[in-house]
Amino acid sequence: MTKAGIIRLSIFFIALLIVSVCAGIGFILNTQYLTPATQWLLKETYFPSFKTEKVTYIFPFHFKLQNTMLSSDSPVFGSIDLWFNPYQTNIHQIVLDSFLMSDADIKASPPVLSIPSLIKMNQFAAKNVNFTTESGAVLQNLDIQIEHPEWRDSQLNILPSGNIQLYIKTILWRGESFKNVLLTGKYIADHSSIQSLSFNWRQGKISLSANEHNQQWNVSHLSAEKLDLSLSQIQQLRYKFQELASLSINKIERIDLLTSQFTSPHLKLINCDLSASGLSFSPQENTVWTQNDARLSLSADSISIDNYQWIEPDLSILLSPRKIDIEDFNASILQGNVHFSGQFTPEKISIKEIEVTGLKWFIEQDTVTTFPWLKTYTKHLNELSADNIKIQNSQIIQLARKPYWQLSGINLDASDTHIKSQNKWGLWNGKVSLSVDSLSYDDTIASQGIMEMHSSGHNWYLDRLFIPYNNGYIKASGKWAYQDKGAPWEINMEANSLPLKPIHLLPFPLTGFSDLYLKASGLSGDSVILGHTLSGKLQMSIRDGMLQLNDKNIEFSMPDTLISADRGRITLPETVLGPEEGDLTIRGHWNFAETGTDQLSLKKADRQYNLLQSDVSTATEKNHSNDMATP
């Protein structure tokens, strides 16, 4: 045989061998022998714990394993699909285009999939998997896909590292339902990243992006839309998730709440848009007073605080350790507009600016609000100051209880004021000017009232008080040196036709009009010092007077009378009251330094009354005009 013939014969036998091998493989792939052959191959190679009921070959490179267990305690997967890539496969490595696990119910710990380095996957996926975690979370209809997965020796191999896409129809956990959960990101143990995570929850939609660092998450952006939560629901959520959030979340760089509602017993927000950046949720920085340069902005259709509704509020806040800076606040309330900026700490409020325009405040019985939360805060407030306060063309009407009163056309300017110092209220520094176009108190009507005061150098000054009313006026000035020894004070007041009806000094009705001039002074260290140092004089007269004794109206007038005060002892000399000359007299004395000695005696004919007693009808008849009847 020639050399050429030998070569041809060799090629023939090689070709015959290849054809025979291929024919054998093809025979196995398309007969009942494929399943036992695959089971034997898996057991004798890298997957000894794999168990499968049936193996199907689908041309050209697709194999389907049905009812497969990864280990003896593994759940059953309805199918596992493998797509081989012959073009990337070589003698050193088998390459799968895709590895898909489908239709399984996993309880507690997920199965561990050990993939040898001989096998490389371009894609790892799972579909239609129900998974119940050890913490009780139920994941329904889970689909997951990981591109270019990598199994690392240091991992538990629950999931490989790689670019991940995940969809879960429903997650049920701790009484909450999260629907249509969609996640894209990159999974690397302890260094994962979430490019996008979105889900539907409580009729709202949530989305976020985050990065993992040191086993905690830094959330770069969290967005929530159309949430509707009450305070009780938020408290329940805090109880359910606060511990987990504080352990898992280091900080949230930005939060956006859009078109959401919030309600509590004292607060209600409608269509609220809230943006926050730099918030920290670490255990050391989990309150509003411990944030470090966090910024918030808020707008809403309305915010209701107790019975008062703020329309279209717009708010910008900066949070620092033990400090809240309200950089800008604007809103409409009570038919007026409010602008505010200032700084809050747990013990101090520093107002930069308040502007109120056109406010109309009606205080009625069913709208009286005590603001207990505000009282709680101001109770612990030591300092309150304001650089600038301006009120223009505003009105207050009090109809909750008698006597009714109202102020209209209120205009106020205050600058550099210190309103509360060392937990005491007052004007401790600054200047205040107040004017009112009209005011009324019960039946008394006044107009164009003005009050001016200032405080400086530890002295408070009432520069001017002038209120013209009906057919008269009242004006006053005064001074209080509150830092000097004993805190001396003085006041000068003059009134013409002053109505007595609104002044409830006696325990029975008294009406009339008084002309008076008062000049008084003393020390105000405490109530005892005040009582021992009160000195001055009151020159007054009364006309058209009427008082009620024993259900009988007594008309009277009092001539110009000097009432003197000397170190707490006040004396009203015996004075004859008209119009019946000699028939009605009054006298009295008070001693603030002693108790139980005060008297105000009214004598009419042969009867004498102590006007300081609440029941003057018990007065008795006396034979001696100078004796006082004791009720």
Image: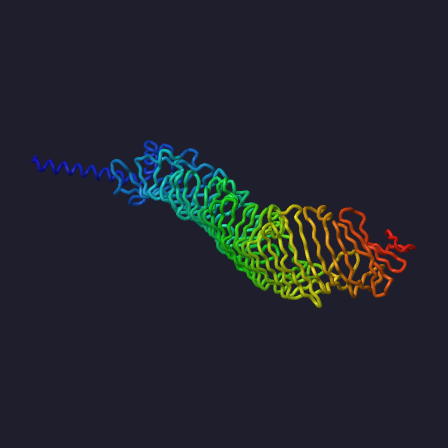
- Spot occupied by residue 582 in the image (x, y as percentages of width and height): 87, 62
Q: Residue drawn at (80%, 52%), measured in percent from left and top?
A: 589
User: Could you tell me residue 628's position as x and y percent?
Assistant: 86, 53
Instruction: Specify whether residue 79 is in view.
Output: no
Viewer-proximal residue among 333 and 516: 516
Of residues 246 and 510, which is closer to you in this image?
Answer: 510
Residue 630: percent from left, percent from top: 86, 51
Image quadrant in which the N terminus is located: top left
Q: Toward which corner of the image does residue 144 lie, by quadrant?
A: top left
Q: Residue furthest bottom?
A: 471
Residue 610 location, quadrant: bottom right
The answer to which of 212 and 607 lies nearer the viewer is: 607
Going by the picture, which residue comes out furthest to the left? 2
**Rendered location of residue 118, percent (x, y):** 30, 35
Give the answer, above or below, for where 95 lies relative to 454: above
Q: Quadrant of residue 359?
A: bottom right
The answer to whether residue 116 is left or right of residue 240 is left
Does residue 127 lie above or below 44 as drawn? Answer: below
Position of residue 263 in the picture relative to residue 180 (left or right): right
**Residue that appears at 50% across and 51% down:** 317
Q: Nearer the viewer, residue 289 or 457?
A: 457
**Whether residue 102 can be seen here:** yes
> Could you tell me which residue is drawn at 70 percent across and 66 percent down?
472
Q: Is residue 395 left or right of residue 101?
A: right
